Amino acid sequence: MSRHSKNNTAASFFTAAEREQLKYGTQKQRIGRDSLKDYNACFLCLQAARDPLCCSRGHLACKECFYDNILSQKKQIERQRKLLEAHQKELSVEESAKAEAKRMEKVVQFAKTQVEFVPTDEGRSKGEKKSLPSFWVLAFKPTLTPDAKPTTVDAPRESILCTAGDPEHSISLKKLVSIQFSTSKTDNGTQISCPSCLKALRNGMRMIFSKNCGHVVCGTCTDKFVKKSGHCFVCEKRCKEKELVTLQTEGTGLAGGGGKLRAEKVEVAFAG
């Protein structure tokens, strides 16, 4: 066997070929263009967005998908709130039962003190057995897991979150912006393009829209015309620089395309 053979197992470390065959440790693979969604695709259904809406951070989705996602989050928050209320009610009932048991214990103890003799543990005979816990009183009910922690229910969150961002951020229906893409005619049909330079939009371009109107313009034309004039290039609506939002894309699959282009899968490193 040669020194540089791929199947050399005499070394104290794994070669790249051996690591690839054994699936050892964390596996990393570069994502291609086919694995990245288009700039006009919904981040929920991954299809071309219908009646696209965008949040304040530039995440695009269908109007129906956005509404459905917000409604499902509201239902989940309501379920969590009801679960928390039921848990708190159960805890209050348990606390009241314990308080009632302690009160009854004091009453019984007081009644015994009115008798001429109160038996104690020292005065009991050796053959007398101690009384078992009361199974019908919640406070004295024995448990099979005495060291177990009490069940807790987390409080529901107060806001609706956009799950496309990292980290997630809060959104509302009032702050969603309706996105307006411009189209231009070509020899092969129509294409989505910048309304100023008529260049076809793609994932590698920087695309910016205004919160007031939602018209999408490429980054170069935005710097040249929109920011200098303070008005939208399409509808002439007034827009400040702080109201311009960059449309989030997932890159092109190339090194400088932007976005997360590497997938990782953690495997067992040592099975000792």
Image (cartoon, helix red, strand yellow):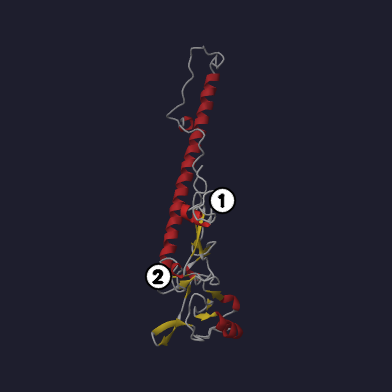
Q: Nearer the viewer, residue 34 or 272?
A: 272
Q: Mark 1: which secondary structure?
A: loop
- Is there any visible trace of residue 265 in the rendered image? no
Q: Residue furthest right?
A: 228
Q: Which residue type does callout 1 highlight?
A: Phe
Going from N to C along the chain, the mark reached first, 1 or 2, is 1
- The local crowd at label 1, few if under 14, some if 14 to 19, many if 20 or more residues have their Cα within 10 Å, is few
State which mark lies toward you, 1 or 2.
Answer: 1
Give residue 81's position: percent from left, percent from top: 46, 52
Q: Which residue type does callout 2 highlight?
A: Gln
Residue name at image x 38 percent, y 85 percent: 189
Give residue 95's position: percent from left, percent from top: 51, 38
Give residue 114's position: percent from left, percent from top: 54, 18
Question: From the viewer's perspective, is residue 31 above or below residue 20?
Answer: below
- The local crowd at label 2, few if under 14, some if 14 to 19, many if 20 or more residues have their Cα within 10 Å, is some
Q: Nearer the viewer, residue 35 or 72?
A: 35
Q: Which residue is mark 1?
A: 13
- Is there any visible trace of residue 132 in the rendered image? yes
Q: Which residue is mark 2?
A: 47
Residue name at image x 57 percent, y 15 percent: 122
Question: From the viewer's perspective, is residue 111 above or below residue 184?
Answer: above
Q: Nearer the viewer, residue 200 or 131?
A: 200
Give residue 223's position: percent from left, percent from top: 59, 82
